[in-house]
């Protein structure tokens, strides 16, 4: 029943919020942006840029001293009550030795709609079953969560968000400790959620994966440095403004690459996807597929 | 020969003590599963000492024990929160300062009114000579805690496992927090009447820690720890007749023994099982 009422489009509007910590330091200052249903948005910034504070404000854990957050036109409180918001925690935040199974964790996503005793009904079991199958974790339903691989762990918590029937899904660093195959599986699932009209907000410092699957970006450094469609926002200058000196740069102008090598240059990285910029400081993508429009536009550039 | 072992059952006060201990032990056991998982063992220790002034106050003013313990439990929890928020001290130091202060106030109270209060029975417990009035209060508090756990254990599980998720789903986390503290204070007093203030904390941690070594499921862990708490407490009270020693010490020693057994021989998380696995991996 909650699922049906939640199936409409969702929106997230953050209006000029400011958050101060107890010691008077500003964590966020005048942050505004808005997202419509059917969006995957990356929240990008260095550690301490206020990403987690912003998440906490959206979840109502932190009360902004100014401004407000509206979810689907509702206050955060009401949105939480209607199970619109789900949160997928960072791996470090979870006690992996806790005696719960994969099934138990996914079932926790149903608590908000269960009765006083939280005894699962047939409907709850059906939804949990379906959510676990969708993330490919059904076979592991009886495993204790600590016995899973990094990617499987992530998928369990995604299943919990699915079981909750949430429309605004917040993911905190979903790709740390996850191999490339799982990363792609998670991205595929997030794309499905986008098709279903969800708003997916991903906090990440894994820059390279952002252009792969995020339509929009919020660059954060206490304030919003830039916000909008990924191709427009992910420019060298914006990223420099957000990250300051914290990024490593590798330029290839003076490299040993020969002109007869053409475009076939391989970039290896041990952990995260690299971000590759072309000569004019605009973003280069790995695949041309699906980017025909962009290619056309760039062809016309001098 | 057999008759000798049946002797304790001929004394009504002993049978009563065994039943009370079993009941309090079982409820403490169930609660201890949550205490260990939430990482509140130190807090349990703190509260078990902090309720002493409440017990003293209740005795002196003839209030119900529950009221006295609630007041001092809430005051102690509040004091810890306040000191932590307004100093740069770490949590363990804050707890240490606050709970010893409360304990000292309690002991001071006892020493000021030696005719009305018995230091030994508060510190070491005296379940064998428990007054009927206290007995009913202990049973009442235990029953209340058992009922709350039975009805709300799933909420408590989520609260222990992932507080943020509980909040995101609109559960009242502050209320759960307060209820948890309330349950802890209530059981601290109930256990204080049986094993004494010094050993309460064992009742609130050891059965849960033991069960944690044996299972990967929360519900099973709660049942196991309740069974451990109940059985060891009844047996401890029974054994205290033969060794002619303190009931509380017997109970807690049994719990420690069981814990050690599981620490070594638990099928999956025991020391021997872990070593076997390491060897398998190595070969």
Image (spheres, coloured by chain):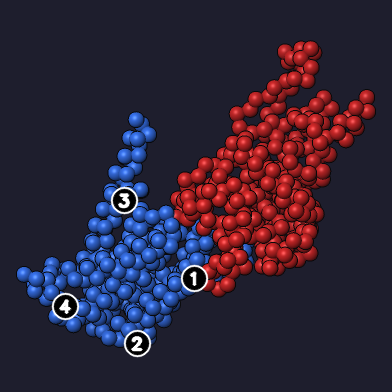
Chain colours: A red, B blue
Q: State the separation of the CA atoms marked 1 and 3.
A: 29 Å
For label 1, count other residues whose C-alpha is less than 10 Å away and answer few (under 14), some (14-19) or many (20+).
some
Q: Which of disc 3 and disc 2 is earlier in sequence?
A: 2
Q: Are marks 1 and 3 on the same chain?
A: yes
In the rendered image, residues at marks 4 and 1 fall on the same chain: yes
Which label's residue is closer to the chain start, 4 or 3? 4
* Location of mark 1 (residue): B152
Q: Are marks 2 and 1 in contact (CB under 8 Å)?
A: no
Picture coordinates of residue A141, whole percent (x, y)? 52, 52
Out of A232 and B56, give the one closest to the viewer. Answer: A232
Task: State which tag comes first along the sequence, 2 or 1.
Answer: 2
- Sequence-first disc among 1 and 3: 1
The answer to whether marks 2 and 3 mark residues whose Cβ atoms lie closer than 8 Å is no
Work out how far the residue at label 4 is from the one at label 3, CA to CA, in angstroms.
33 Å
Q: Residue at x 79, y 64 (%)?
A: A73
- List the residue tagged with mark 2: B62
Q: Quadrant of residue A77?
A: bottom right
> Real-space Cα distance between discs 2 and 3?
47 Å
What is the CA distance from the residue labelled 4 to the residue labelled 1?
36 Å
Give residue A142's mark.
none
Looking at the rendered structure, the secondary structure element under dot 4 is: helix
The image shows residue B66, relative to residue A177, as above or below, that is below
Q: Quadrant of residue A302?
A: top right
What residue do we see at 76% from left, 14% from top? A261
- Whole-angstrom CA distance, mark 2 to mark 1, is 32 Å
Q: Chain of mark 3?
A: B
């Amino acid at each position: 029943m909650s699922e049906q009422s939640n199936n409409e489009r969702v929106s997230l509007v953050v209006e000029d919020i400011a958050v101060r910590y107890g010691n008077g330091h500003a964590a966020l200052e005048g942050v505004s942006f808005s997202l419509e249903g059917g969006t995957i948005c990356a929240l990008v910034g260095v550690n301490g840029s206020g990403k987690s504070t912003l998440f906490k404000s959206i979840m109502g854990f932190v009360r902004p001293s100014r401004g407000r957050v509206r979810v689907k036109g509702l206050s955060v409180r009401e949105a939480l009550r209607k199970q619109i918001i789900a949160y997928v925690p960072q791996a470090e935040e979870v006690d992996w030795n806790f005696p719960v199974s994969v099934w138990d964790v996914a079932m926790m996503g149903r608590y908000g709609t269960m009765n006083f005793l939280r005894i699962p009904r047939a409907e709850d079991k059906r939804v949990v079953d379906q959510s676990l199958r969708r993330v490919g974790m059904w076979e592991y339903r009886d495993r204790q969560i600590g016995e899973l691989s990094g990617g499987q762990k992530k998928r369990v918590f995604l299943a919990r968000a699915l079981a909750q029937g949430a429309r605004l899904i917040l993911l905190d660093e979903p790709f740390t400790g996850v191999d490339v195959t799982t990363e792609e599986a998670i991205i595929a699932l997030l794309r499905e959620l986008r098709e279903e009209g969800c708003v997916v907000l991903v906090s990440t410092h894994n820059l390279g994966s952002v252009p792969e699957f995020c339509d929009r970006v919020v660059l954060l450094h206490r304030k919003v440095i830039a916000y909008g469609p990924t191709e427009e926002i992910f420019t060298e200058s914006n990223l420099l403004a957000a990250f300051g000196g914290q990024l490593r740069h590798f330029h290839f102008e003076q490299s040993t690459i020969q002109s007869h090598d053409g475009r076939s240059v391989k970039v290896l990285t041990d952990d995260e996807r690299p971000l590759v910029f072309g000569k004019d400081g605009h973003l280069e993508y790995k695949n041309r597929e699906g980017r025909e429009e962009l290619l056309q536009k760039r062809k016309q550039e001098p | 020969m057999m008759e000798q072992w049946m002797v304790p059952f001929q004394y009504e006060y002993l049978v009563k003590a065994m039943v009370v201990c079993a009941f309090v032990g079982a409820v403490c056991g169930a609660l201890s599963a949550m205490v260990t998982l939430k990482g509140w063992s130190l807090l349990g220790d703190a509260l078990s000492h902090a309720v002493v002034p409440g017990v003293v106050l209740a005795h002196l003013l003839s209030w119900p024990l529950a009221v006295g313990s609630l007041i001092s439990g809430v005051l102690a929890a509040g004091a810890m929160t306040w000191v932590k928020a307004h100093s740069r001290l770490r949590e363990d130091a804050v707890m240490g300062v606050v709970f010893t202060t409360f304990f000292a106030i309690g002991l001071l109270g006892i020493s000021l009114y030696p005719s009305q209060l018995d230091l030994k029975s508060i510190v070491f417990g005296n379940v064998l000579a428990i007054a009927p009035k206290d007995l009913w209060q202990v049973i009442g508090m235990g029953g209340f805690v058992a009922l709350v756990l039975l009805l709300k254990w799933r909420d408590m599980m989520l609260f222990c496992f992932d507080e943020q998720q509980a909040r995101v789903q609109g559960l009242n986390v502050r209320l759960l927090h307060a209820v948890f503290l309330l349950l802890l204070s209530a059981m601290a007093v109930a256990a204080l009447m049986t094993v004494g203030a010094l050993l309460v904390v064992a009742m609130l941690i050891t059965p849960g820690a033991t069960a944690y070594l044996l299972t990967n499921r929360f519900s099973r862990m709660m049942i196991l720890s309740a069974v451990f708490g109940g059985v060891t407490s009844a047996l401890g009270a029974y054994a205290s007749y033969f060794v002619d020693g303190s009931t509380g010490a017997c109970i807690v020693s049994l719990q420690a023994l069981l814990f050690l057994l599981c620490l070594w021989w638990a099928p999956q998380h025991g020391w021997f099982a872990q070593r076997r696995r390491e060897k398998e991996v190595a070969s």
